[in-house]
Amino acid sequence: MDQTVKGVYQDVVDALQHPHREVRIQAAQAVGKLIEEGKITRQGTEQVNNHVHTAYSFSPYEPAMAAFKAWQAGLQIVGSIDHDSIASADEMRRAASGIGIASTVGFELRTSFRDTLLSDRKINSPDGTGTAYVVVHGVPGHQIDACSAFLKPVQKARNRRNRKQTTQLNTLLKSTDLGALNFSRDVMSISHADEGGSITERHILSALAQRIIDRTGKGEGIIRRLKEDFSITAAGQVLHYLRDPANPHYLYDLLGVLKAHLLPKFYIQPDESETLPVAEVVKFASSIGAVAAYPYLGDVTESPTGDKKAEQFEDSFLEELFEVLAELGFPAVTYMPPRNTREQLLRVQDLAHRYGLMEISGVDINSSRQSFNCPELLDQDFIHLIDSAWALTAHEKLSEVRESWGLFAHDNPLSGCTLQEKIFRYSSIGRRMDHRFPHRAEEYIGEDLSL
């Protein structure tokens, strides 16, 4: 690569993080052209990632940059999943097609299991009992606006709680010289709330982390301040990270420490206006041709991002959980191979097969320290998840053409086939598609989908 092309390459890549969406999408198209011309290359893999957070909930990456980072990492598919928001979806779809990588879109939200047999259990959320995250995958493009409308009341309720949490955090900050955080100026300003994005606890903690860095500087001073102001003793690998002022991930490492140790002191439980009944969410997902998936967390011993404590979740009542999921009509379960032991995941796979649930994978990316790669997918016990990802992309694009072509549509042409056969057929279509032109999905059906 000569110096002129290098300069163009860097300018284009920088533009993927531009403040304006259309500029980012145009930059993605320019990146795609450089890729087609062989001026930007990569080492491809078979890996996929269906669960990448973007700046529309909390992430270092705008959707266009997330698509490029995924392509650069060798992935074949990238999926955007944001908390309480689907505002990244249009950009992710357009940027991914411009770059030439397959995409899926969806959202994640807390739900209430109060009306189920698990109302008194800690399920997959550290927040408390009777609450669980649900991921809605494979949202057809023409249903994105419906999702935005569905999520708007949830965002409104969450922001009421966010303001109260910021006020409670400010009470804790009174004993320090850091000063109070202003929700609009310090928290909302670093979000995409004005474009339909959500504001999370991570935004509040990011604002605090930046305030600490600005007042203290990076290095030993941060470690002392954590101890003196918040009674937090940094230890292990994170202590090494925080001692290094040149650490490029410093903000996210500090945020992780604050999330693990300070958040519980000002966290407020979501109320019923923010945690919709799980049955309502599953029903909505089905009504728009999307795929509601229960995200298995499993008992945590060590968190990859350093922001989760060792804690017990579903493993002690997993069979009971799957019975409830089946009764609720969940079509899928999703899990993250790097987070769990092989024994945990083989048990999940066995139950998914027993209850006829599709298995979807994804590793949530919300820190610059995290890798987009998931080499565990190449393991013989998990490689079928790659087929599932290809099936999901085909489902999403085909159901835009005809609702009955949705993978779980009641009048799907393959409704008489087993789930495994349907996934195999849809995966074959997904692999054949030219993902630079997703609107032409119908051209790649071939013999896999009888019409």
Image (tube, rainbow, N blue to C red):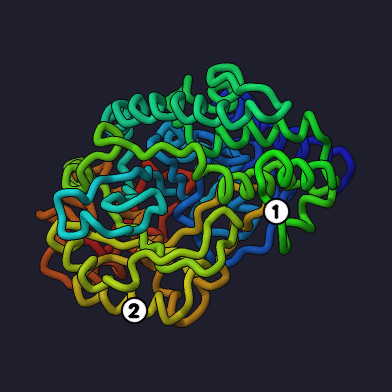
In the drawing, does residue 128 fall left or right of residue 146? right
Numbered disc total: 2
User: Going 17% across and 62% down the picture, which residue do you hit?
Assistant: 324
Residue 240: x percent and y percent? 79, 58
Q: In the rendered structure, which amino acid carries the disc numbered 1?
A: Thr
Q: Which residue is mark 2?
A: 347
In the drawing, does residue 426 fall left or right of residue 59? left
Q: In the rendered structure, which amino acid carries the disc numbered 2?
A: Arg
Dots 2 and 1: beta carbons under 8 Å? Answer: no
Q: Nearer the viewer, mark 2 or mark 1?
A: 1
Residue 43 or residue 322, whichever sits in front: 322
In the drawing, does residue 123 fall left or right of residue 24? left
Residue 423: x percent and y percent? 29, 67
State which quadrant residue 268 falls in: top left
Q: How far apart in space, not on screen, are marks 2 and 1 (Cα)?
A: 36 Å
Q: In the current view of this chain or complex, which residue is farthest to the right?
A: 3
Residue 216 or residue 153, whichever sits in front: 216
SS at circle 2? helix
Give the label on residue 233, or none.
1
